[in-house]
C-alpha cells in the first residue's frame, strides 16, 4: 500500500475549506492507503505560542480531525513532538540544506517581510523540518496546497542529495497527491475567492448555527440577473459552489432554475444555504464536544498514534544512521 502523509499546524479551528478540500478526502483514502496524519506542533513554535494556548490548539485540531472521521485505528494519527526520530533526521538533513536555498523560498521571504522582528532560524529551516516529517516515513504522496509545493520540492531535493551523498536509496522522492481530477477550491462568502484562515472569511466546523447563519446572510451578492440563462458572476457562482457541497441536488436545481429565469431571490438562496451548512456542521460540532470531554480517549488515541509513527520512523532512522556512518563499537 502506498504511503500518504499530511501535516497541519495547530492554529485555530478547521473551516469548511479544510473539511471539503482536505479532510473528507483523507477520510476516504484511509481505506486504500497507508496514512500518516499528524499535528505539526514543532512547526508552530516559530511563532512562540503561549504554552497553555499551544496545548489547547493541539487538542482542538485533534478533536476536530477525529470528529471529521479520521480513524486512529486505520491511520497513524499523531503529534509531531511525540516522535523524536523526526528531530534527529532534521539534524542530519540540516547538514545538506544550504542557507541560500532556504532564504530563497517564497514562504520564508513572506515571513521576513511580514514579521521582520522574528526572523528565527527555525523559520529558515522550516522546509528541512517539513522534509524530515515526510522522509521519516518514506512517504510517497503528500496532499499539499499550492503554497506548500515549494516545500515539497525541497523535500525531494534533500532526499536526492542524501541518497547521492551516501550512495544509498534510503529516501524515495515524495510526490504531490491530487484527489480526483480537479482540485476543489472552497470559496469564501466575501467574494475574495478562497476560504481561508488568513483570509478571515472562514465558516468553521466548530461554529454554532446562529453565527453560521449570520455569516451566510451577509454574503456578498449583486443586483441579480437581467437576462435569462446568463453566466453567473463570481460572487454568485461562489454561493452555488458552496451549495453543491452541502445541499440536495433538487435544491440546487431549484435555485439554478430560478437564476435562469431571473426570478431568483438571494435572501431565499442564502437562507437555504445557511440551513444546509448548519445541517452539515451540527453533527460534527456535537462530536467535537463529546470527544473533547473524553480525556481518557484522547490519551489513548495519541499513544496509539505515537507508537505507530515511532515504529515506522525508527526503521527509517536506523537506515539513515547506518548510511551516514554511525556504527556500533
Ligand atoms: P488556511 O488557508 O486556512 O491557512 P491551511 O493552509 O491550513 O488553510 O489548509 C490546510 C489544507 O486545507 C490545505 O492544504 C488544503 O488542502 C485545504 N484547504 C484550505 N483551504 C481550502 C479551500 N478554501 N478550498 C479547498 N481546500 C482548502
Ligand atoms: N507546512 C505545512 C503547512 O503550513 C504543514 C506541514 C508540516 C506539513 N509538515 C508537513 C504538510 C509535512 C505536509 C507534510 O500547511
Image (cartoon, rainbow, N blue to C red):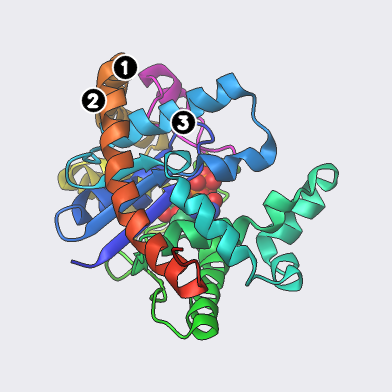
Q: Residue at x 57, y 66 (%)?
A: 93
Find residue 45 and report its horizontal and vertical position in percent.
62, 39
Residue 268 visible, this angle:
no
Residue 42 is situated, as x and y percent measured from the top left of the image, at: 55, 42
Rate crowding at label 1 as few (under 14), some (14 to 19) or many (20 or more) other CA atoms within 10 Å: few
Counting residues from the N terminus, which is met first, the one under dot 3 or under dot 2? 3
Name the outermost residue toward the front: 329
Which quadrant is the N terminus positioned in? bottom left
- Separation of marks 2 and 1 at Cα, in angstroms: 20 Å
Query: Could you tell me if the residues under marks 3 and 2 are in contact, i.e. CB atoms within 8 Å?
Result: no
Circle 2 SS class? helix
Q: Position of residue 146 (x, y in %)?
A: 51, 64
Write the start and end of the magenta stretch as one range: 199-219
Q: Secondary structure at mark 1?
A: helix
Q: Which mark is residue 283?
A: 2
The label nearer to you, 2 versus 1, is 1
Q: Earlier in the sequence, mark 2 or mark 1?
A: 2
Q: Nearer the viewer, mark 3 or mark 2?
A: 3
Residue pointed to by mark 1: 295
Going by the picture, which residue comes out furthest to the top? Answer: 293
- Report the side of 307 relative to 219 (left or right): left
User: Which residue position is annotated with label 3?
Assistant: 58
Amino acid at each position: 500500500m502506498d504511503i500518504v502523509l499530511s501535516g497541519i499546524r495547530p492554529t485555530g479551528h478547521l473551516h469548511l475549506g479544510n473539511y471539503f478540500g482536505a479532510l473528507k478526502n483523507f477520510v476516504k483514502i484511509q481505506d486504500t492507503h497507508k496514512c500518516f496524519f499528524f499535528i505539526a506542533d514543532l512547526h508552530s513554535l516559530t511563532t512562540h505560542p503561549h504554552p497553555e494556548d499551544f496545548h489547547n490548539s493541539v487538542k482542538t485540531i485533534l478533536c476536530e480531525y477525529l470528529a471529521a472521521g479520521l480513524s486512529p485505528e486505520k491511520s497513524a494519527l499523531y503529534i509531531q513532538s511525540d516522535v523524536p526520530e523526526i528531530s534527529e533526521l532534521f539534524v542530519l538533513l540540516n547538514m545538506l540544506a544550504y542557507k541560500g536555498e532556504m532564504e530563497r523560498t517564497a514562504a520564508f521571504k513572506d515571513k521576513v517581510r511580514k514579521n521582520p522582528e522574528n526572523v528565527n532560524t527555525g523559520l529558515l529551516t522550516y522546509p528541512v523540518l517539513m522534509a524530515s516529517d515526510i522522509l521519516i516515513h518514506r512517504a510517497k504522496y503528500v496532499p499539499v496546497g499550492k503554497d506548500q509545493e515549494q516545500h515539497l520540492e525541497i523535500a525531494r531535493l534533500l532526499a536526492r542529495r542524501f541518497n547521492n551523498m551516501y550512495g544509498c536509496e534510503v529516501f524515495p522522492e515524495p510526490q504531490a497527491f491530487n484527489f480526483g481530477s480537479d482540485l476543489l477550491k472552497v470559496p469564501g462568502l466575501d467574494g475574495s475567492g478562497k476560504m481561508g484562515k488568513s483570509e478571515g472569511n472562514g465558516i468553521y466546523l466548530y461554529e454554532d448555527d446562529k453565527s453560521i447563519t449570520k455569516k451566510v446572510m451577509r454574503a456578498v451578492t449583486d443586483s441579480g440577473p437581467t437576462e435569462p440563462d446568463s453566466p453567473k458572476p463570481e460572487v454568485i457562482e461562489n454561493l452555488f459552489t458552496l451549495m453543491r457541497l452541502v445541499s440536495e441536488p433538487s435544491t440546487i436545481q431549484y435555485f439554478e432554475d430560478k437564476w435562469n429565469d431571473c426570478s431568483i431571490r438571494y435572501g431565499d438562496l442564502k437562507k437555504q444555504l445557511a440551513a444546509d451548512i448548519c445541517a452539515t456542521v451540527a453533527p460534527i460540532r456535537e462530536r467535537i464536544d463529546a470527544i473533547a470531554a473524553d480525556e481518557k480517549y484522547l490519551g489513548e488515541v495519541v499513544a496509539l498514534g505515537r507508537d505507530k509513527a515511532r515504529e515506522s520512523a525508527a526503521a527509517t532512522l536506523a537506515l539513515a544512521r547506518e548510511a551516514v556512518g554511525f556504527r556500533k563499537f
